[in-house]
Image: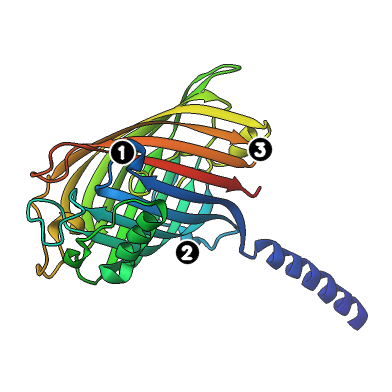
Amino acid sequence: MSKILLLLFIIVNTFAQEYIAKEEESWNLQRSNFYFENDMYFNTDYDYTAGVRLSFLYHIQNPKKNIYDISLLDFGGSSTYRSFALVHQMYTPKNKKQKTLIVDDRPYAGWTYFEAGLHKSSKTHLRSLNLKLGIVGPTSGAEHFQNFIHDTIGAEHVYGWDNQLHNELGINLKYTHKWRFLYLKQKLLETSLVPFGEIELGNISIKATAGFSMRIGYNIPKDFGVSSIDIGGEDGIPSFEENILCNQKDWSFSINISGASSAVSKDIFLDGNTDGDSHSVKKENFIGYYGVGFSIRYKKFIFDFIQTYNTKKFNTENGGHDTGTIVFSWLYN
């Protein structure tokens, strides 16, 4: 009898260990994205003048539900993802030669931060929660980075960084919700529409944004779209159980169109430091963006380009401003 009980114990323990192993949470690297944003593509060098971002997206197998349920809403089957990114952004006035304060133009400012994101995607919904933690001011390294680049390429030295925003710890939380709709789907042509809404809160910015992105092309990715660093969330998060259908073919191509508008209550890069002891300009509380671009994928490599036009962001700005976003991505699965 004892031998039978021992055998039963061994069998049950073996199955239990296999079950635990199957249920143990695991992280699989899905995608990496490198963003390079600059206005030099349009022969300008002011306002939001540059941004770089390196991010990694992980697919979470067997996620712990009490940790990853970021919304009470249920959209059926879903996949869980985590993302991590390091980001640097730079803002400057138009006149780079003037050493003294330019009172009617935006402040010099740099913003370097770490971003951690949590994402849940179903076939038609994506919910993302992102935390940004970093530093605004000289410690961000923006002055040294810009002048190093300018000196390297033989461009004009920038003299006004003594007037930049002073050091301030930045903490911001952003929630983004996307919807995905498929329309035309034929042998060689597909379209997808992804409306989105997002809310951002913190001492860096307080704003609400609504917008959309649309793809028209061949074998378009089964995901929630491509975006810039600030608007639209993480690139390339797959729709639940569908992205493998796109990757079965070597090539994908699409023309992309996007648009968004924001209601802005706070923008540290225009309002100045939170303590009020810095240069500031009167911001516009309602701003808009629209963009056009394209995406090309060959096997695991993806190239995206977006040209974004921004309406004026402060009342003494002469007009809108164009920025280009380039994204190089690599798929690991």
Residue 195 visible in this rendered orientation of the protein: no
**Residue matched to label 2:** 66
Residue 299, numbered circle? 3
Dot in front, 1 or 2: 1
Taking the image as shown, residue 213 lies to the left or right of residue 310, namely: right
To which residue does mark 1 refer? 43
The N terminus, quarter of image: bottom right
Of residues 57 and 272, the one drawn nearer to the viewer in this rendering = 272
Instruction: Measure the C-alpha gap from mark 1 to mark 2.
Output: 50 Å
Tell me if residue 173 comes above or below residue 2 in the rendering. above
- Number of other residues with Cα within 10 Å of mark 3, as a class: few under 14, some 14 to 19, many 20 or more: some
Question: Residue 245 location, x and y as percent?
Answer: 64, 33
Q: How is the image coloured?
A: rainbow
In-image side of 7 versus 293 (left or right): right
Q: Residue at x 21, y 53 (%)?
A: 96
Amino acid type assigned to the residue bearing label 2 in the image: Asn
Q: Judge whether 299 appears above or below 332 on screen.
A: above
Instruction: Tell whether label 1 touches label 3 (CB within 8 Å).
Output: no
- Nearest to N terminus: mark 1 or mark 2: 1
- The amino acid on which the numbered mark 3 sits, given as a three-letter code, is Lys
**x, y percentage for residue 208?**
23, 47
Q: Quadrant of residue 24?
A: bottom right
Residue type beneath disc 1: Asn
Q: Quadrant of residue 113?
A: bottom left
Q: CA distance from mark 2 to mark 3?
A: 36 Å
